[in-house]
Image: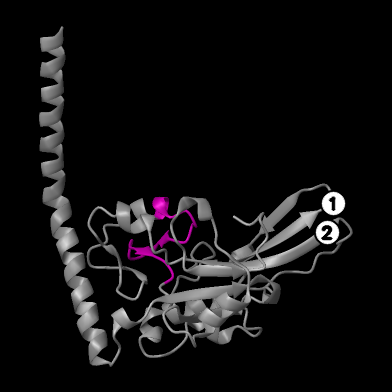
């Protein structure tokens, strides 16, 4: 019996070795390509006077200031050429309503792009608020870990990007994202998500959603600079992140966030 068990273990080891070797032949070229892309991005932005390693970007959201106007959603779609269909969003707004019977209703009609209709009857609603959501630009991103070809990668300044040349459209990253922040583009079949408007921030501009917010509910800034609006926001508020138990280390921080928000 022991000889048979030993033989089976050896066979399993050989099978695993062959399997991993076969997988590596497909995966390694993609990873090398993504690493090369990081170097190219670094070179390109340096030509514009921007040094990625000198920054670490994040965003703050003050729930008490969000009025659910949907301007951030509209601006994001226009700035980043997001499909107009109501299924695709890089950022969206959810409305939370707490009812007298301890029920919670969460709604986001068309991502909140057309704002929210006033309730005809609010007698049974105890309170309500709006919660903008987007890619959390995690410092420990599960989407990067599961990408089989390295198309999803993290830049030196902490932003998660997708290499469109290497993306297979396999949807692994979409499934791995615990925040539901990714989608597959219906035409290109490439994974997409919020990039903090990376093309804007390397030029010294705020993301489009931050720029158009009429109540300054969104605060964008550099976590490494003490004078950054985001650093001041973190210092002056009791902040929370979404799904903290997952240890993804999000860089989107919420002030006045209710514990019911997921």
Picture quarter with the C terminus: bottom right
Picture quarter with the N terminus: top left
Q: Residue at x 40, y 84 (%)?
A: 201
Q: Position of residue 254 (x, y in %)?
A: 59, 68
* Numbered-mark total: 2
Residue 241 is a magenta residue: no
C-beta proximity under 8 Å, tags 1 and 2: yes
Element class at badge 2: strand
Which of the marked residues, 1 or 2, is nearer the chain's N terminus? 1
Element class at badge 1: loop
The boundaries of the magenta stretch are 174-194
Mark 1 crowd level (few <14, some 14–19, many ≥20, 10 Å Cα): few
Q: Residue at x 45, y 54 (%)?
A: 247
Quadrant assignment, res 160: bottom left
Q: Which residue in the structure is indicated by mark 2?
A: 126
Q: Position of residue 203 (x, y in %)?
A: 37, 90
Quadrant assignment, res 188: bottom left
Q: Is residue 91 visible?
A: no
Establish if 126 lies above or below 46: above
Q: Nearer the viewer, residue 179 or 92?
A: 179
Between the C-alphas of marks 1 and 2, the distance is 6 Å
């Amino acid at each position: 019996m022991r000889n048979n068990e030993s033989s089976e273990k050896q066979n399993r080891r050989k099978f695993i070795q062959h399997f991993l070797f076969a997988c590596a032949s497909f995966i390694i070229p993609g990873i090398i390509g993504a690493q090369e892309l990081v170097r190219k991005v670094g070179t390109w932005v340096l030509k514009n006077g921007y040094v990625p390693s000198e920054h670490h970007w994040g965003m703050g959201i003050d729930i008490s200031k969000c009025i659910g106007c949907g301007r951030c959603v509209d601006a994001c779609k226009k700035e980043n050429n997001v499909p107009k269909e109501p299924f695709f969003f890089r950022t969206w707004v959810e409305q939370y309503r707490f009812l007298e019977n301890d029920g919670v209703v969460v709604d986001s009609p068309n991502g909140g792009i057309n704002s929210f209709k006033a309730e005809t009857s609010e007698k049974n609603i105890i309170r309500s608020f709006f919660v903008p959501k987007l890619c959390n630009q995690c410092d420990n991103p599960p989407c990067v870990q599961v990408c089989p070809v390295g198309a999803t990668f993290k830049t030196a300044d902490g932003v998660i990007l997708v290499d469109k040349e290497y993306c297979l459209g396999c949807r692994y990253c979409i499934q791995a994202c615990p925040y539901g922040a990714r989608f597959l583009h219906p035409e290109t079949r490439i994974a997409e998500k919020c990039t903090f408007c990376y093309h804007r921030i390397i030029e010294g501009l705020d993301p489009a959603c931050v720029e158009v917010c009429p109540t300054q509910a969104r605060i964008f800034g550099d976590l490494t600079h003490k004078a950054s609006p985001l650093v001041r926001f973190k210092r002056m508020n009791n902040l929370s992140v979404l799904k903290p138990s997952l240890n993804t280390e999000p860089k989107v921080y919420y002030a006045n966030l209710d514990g019911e928000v997921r």
